[in-house]
Image (spheres, helix red, strand yellow):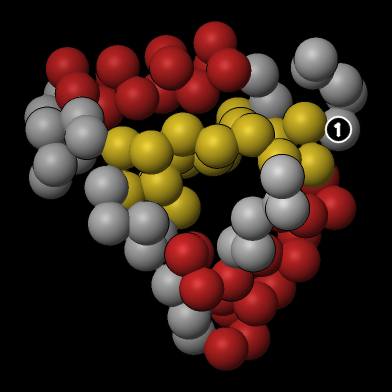
């Protein structure tokens, strides 16, 4: 279920860097496809896509910026 505070992320294949940020999954796919067409993705389009809340994204971004850590270290998965 999509809510207004959803944030969609494309992260490099190694889960280290956020490549693209979008408000919808369609917008994110368009950004990825555009980068593939322009040959600006080093991984030839191999990315991981995530959906999170705006609040979680802000916490992740803060950890990445303040501590200089990779996305996979800053993003803690929700327990199933």
Please tell me whether mark 1 sits on a helix, a strand or a loop.
loop
Asked whether 60 or 1 is in front, the reply is: 1
Instruction: Count the marks.
Output: 1
Disc 1 crowd rating (10 Å Cα; few below 14, some 14-19, many 20+) is few
Side of 18 where 67 appears, left or right: right
Q: Is residue 7 visible?
A: yes
Q: Residue at x 37, y 63 (%)?
A: 16
User: Which residue in the rendered view is the most extreme toward the front?
Assistant: 80
Q: Residue at label 1? A: 5
Side of 63 where 6 appears, left or right: right
Q: Quadrant of residue 6?
A: top right
Residue 23 on image: x %, y %: 69, 26
Residue 21 on image: x %, y %: 56, 38
Residue 26 on image: x %, y %: 54, 10
Q: Is residue 40 visible?
A: no
User: Which residue in the rendered view is the most extreme toward the bottom?
Assistant: 67
Seen in the picture, residue 67 relative to 47 is either above or below; the reply is below
Q: Residue at x 85, y 53 (%)?
A: 55
Q: Residue at x 30, y 17 (%)?
A: 33
Seen in the picture, residue 39 relative to 13 is either above or below; the reply is above
Q: Residue at x 80, y 15 (%)?
A: 1
Residue 10 on image: x %, y %: 44, 38
Seen in the picture, residue 76 relative to 20 is either above or below; the reply is below
Q: Quadrant of the C terminus?
A: top right
Q: Quadrant of residue 7?
A: top right
């Amino acid at each position: 279920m999509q809510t207004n505070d959803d944030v969609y992320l494309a992260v490099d294949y190694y889960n280290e860097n956020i490549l693209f940020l979008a408000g919808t999954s369609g917008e994110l796919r368009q950004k990825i496809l555009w980068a593939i067409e322009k040959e600006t993705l080093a991984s030839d389009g191999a990315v991981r896509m995530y959906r999170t809340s705006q609040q979680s994204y802000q916490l992740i971004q803060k950890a990445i910026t303040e501590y200089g850590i990779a996305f996979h270290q800053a993003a803690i998965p929700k327990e199933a």
